[in-house]
Image (tube, rainbow, N blue to C red):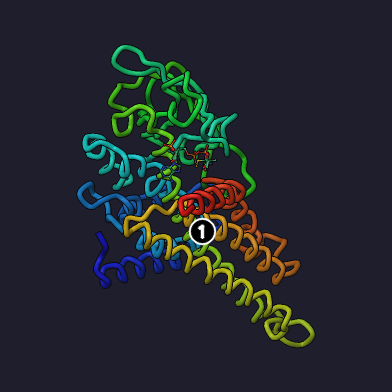
Amino acid sequence: MALDQETLNQLLETVRRYVDERLIPLEEEVARNDAIPDEVSAEMRELGLYGLSIPEEYGGLGLTLEEECLTMFELGRTSPVFRSLIGTNVGIGSQGIVIDGTEEQKQRYLPELASGELVGSFCLTEPDAGSDAVSVRTSAKRDGNGYVLNGTKRFITNSIKAGVLTVMARTDPDNKGSGGVSSFLVDAKSDGITVGPPYQKMGQQGSHVADIFFEDVKVPADAIIGGVEGQGFKTAMKVLERGRVHLSSVCVGLSERLILEAVSYASERKQFGEPIAGFQLIQAMLADSRTESYAARCMTLDAARKYDAGEKVPMEAACCKYYASEMVGRVADRAVQIHGGAGYVSDYPVERFYRDVRLFRIYEGTSQIQQLVIAKNMLRQYAATQ
Ligand code: COS
């Protein structure tokens, strides 16, 4: 359900102020310590940010995807690790339940995910199943009334804090395709689960990814999302479709910040006796960044509105993720270029953002996977007209 305009404006204004007054001043400390202070997580819970996308009847704010994107345009203007903190609860860690869960599963998990009491993680990627997500090897063998899970999940965001895991595992060993995969809701404290140490990453310090090992983990039969075997890959794809629009809005938000940093530096930095913003080659870089950021914003809102209207948007979501993540990479690169030597040292935030944005072209589907999804849908649409 859409919020009324005044409530939406209030939410956006609150997030804008919180980003400017609280989060931006904390960025350096978070990167240095590779940790977000616990108070920030408590404040985000208070603001309702963990529950943005969860329907109101389960304790969330019940935003439409368009409203969620508008909120991410604001939250995206600071270090992306703050978005990551709530990101799995808003997106991939809760949406399997929201989209395909049974009523019982929704009532059991969504209120605590919405409040942030419980953290959700999404476990699709494996050592040998990344882009080729259909080939998941984690097995879920029938055992009496339930299943036993065995396997390894790789690079799982927020796994260290997670309480509930959405785990894609193969229930039908004879079906190597997508129909052999089911999604399970697994208590992260179950016997047989261990979480590895956090990876040392190129950027986004303060957000953590780690592997999860499942060794003879017993789960009840009603842990399957939607209660039906063989639907798990489709659930994962639906979650990723929505998540790709969400991530695009994060890229747009961060591009706005980078543009601000670039314009402000160019206006102050003097060379040849005047601010470098007066030079047309600098202006060209600023103009290219503004144009591309604006294009990504328009695409993201268009895809979100279509999604909210009930349309299937796998192609549009892939177009947005592809374009917005590549766009913010170029904008970060130009911001560093405009800063010159100052852009290569850590005195200015663009050096950190340059490393942070690199991830956007990789996770939740690489740029190359988005290209495949786009082309596949184009060809399918053409074939349907023949
Ligand atoms: N919504 C609903 N169903 C979807 C869907 C979507 N957005 N996308 C695909 N499906 C369904 C298809 O309709 C198909 O169902 P049927 O078997 O009934 O026809 C099934 O899922 C398999 O889809 P598809 O045939 O497109 O799978 P492919 O093996 O061709 O391609 C790709 C799958 C490569 C696109 C997929 O593996 C992928 O997205 N990989 C990247 C995964 C990823 O993003 N990983 C990041 C880590 S997770 S954070």
* Residue found at the very far front of the displayed protein: 386
The residue positioned 29% from the left and 38% from the top of the image is 101
Can residue 37 be seen?
no
Q: Tell me residue 251's x, y (percent).
A: 52, 60
Please give left or right for residue 265 compared with residue 45 in the image: right
Q: Residue at x 36, y 34 (%)?
A: 164
Question: In the figure, residue 293 lies in which quadrant?
Answer: bottom right
Q: Left or right: 154 with respect to 172?
A: right
In this view, which residue lies farthest toward the right?
272
What is the residue that sits farthest to the top in this orientation?
A: 144
Q: Nearer the viewer, residue 351 or 175?
A: 175
107 displayed left or right of 181: left
Residue tagged by mark 1?
A: 320
x and y, in percent, of residue 327 in the image: 60, 62
Q: Classify the position of the N terminus by image quarter.
A: bottom left
Residue shown at the point (42%, 65%) measured from the top left: 301
SS of the residue at dot 1? helix
Image height of 114 relative to 279, above or below: above
Q: Crowding near pointer 1: few (<14 within 10 Å), some, many (20+)?
A: many
Give whichever of 94, 137 is nearer the camera: 137
Residue 174 higher or lower than 250, as above or below: above
